[in-house]
Amino acid sequence: MTELINLCITSEVEEGTPLAVSLSGLPELLVCEFEGEFFVTDNTCTHGNAKLSEGYQEEDEIECPFHGGTFSIRTGEATSFPCVIPIKSYPVTIVDEKVCISHAQQPS
Ligand code: FES
């Protein structure tokens, strides 16, 4: 079974100002906006323990604040050195101005 998890409202995120979201049971997430679309990825760099929300958004990429590696906010792909391992990206659904992701529930 899949449920939608509400991360934030769309007006809380502006292009160039990503939002970090912490919810119990999930890794810390990063919500970014680019050209009116919203994207959700993990917020922790795969090269070190940096918060990507403290880095810099340049179009559809996020630059890590520690060593300047970059990731695609669309796919999570590592796009420049020293980052080589992708971050996880999550399909986004917008419901009533809320940015949501799907979360698979374990059957009980
Ligand atoms: S910790 Fe992110 S590039 Fe090194």
Image (spheres, rainbow, N blue to C red):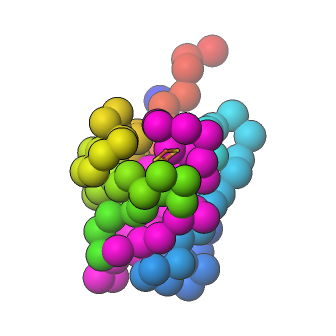
* Identity of the residue furthest to the right in this view: 24
Asked if residue 57 is positioned above or below residue 69 in the image, the reply reads below
Percent coordinates x, y for residue 30 in the rendering: 53, 57
Percent coordinates x, y for residue 6 in the rendering: 59, 58
Asked if residue 14 is positioned above or below residue 39 in the image, the reply reads below
Q: Is residue 75 visible?
A: no
Question: Image quarter for residue 70?
Answer: bottom left
| In this rendering, position of residue 47 left or right of residue 72 | right
* Identity of the residue furthest to the top in this view: 108
| In this rendering, position of residue 59 left or right of residue 57 | left
Query: Which residue appears at 49% of the width and 83% of the height?
Result: 14
Percent coordinates x, y for residue 74 in the rendering: 29, 57
Query: Which residue appears at 48% of the width and 31% of the height?
Result: 104
Percent coordinates x, y for residue 43 in the rendering: 55, 50
Q: Nearer the viewer, residue 7 or 42?
A: 42
Question: Image quarter for residue 40?
Answer: bottom left
Residue 107 part of the magenta-drawn span: no
Q: How many marks?
A: 0
**From which residue to which does the magenta span run?**
31-58
Query: Which residue appears at 53% of the width and 78% of the height?
Result: 17
Q: Quadrant of the C terminus?
A: top right
| In this rendering, position of residue 14 left or right of residue 86 | right
Q: Nearer the viewer, residue 77 or 79?
A: 79
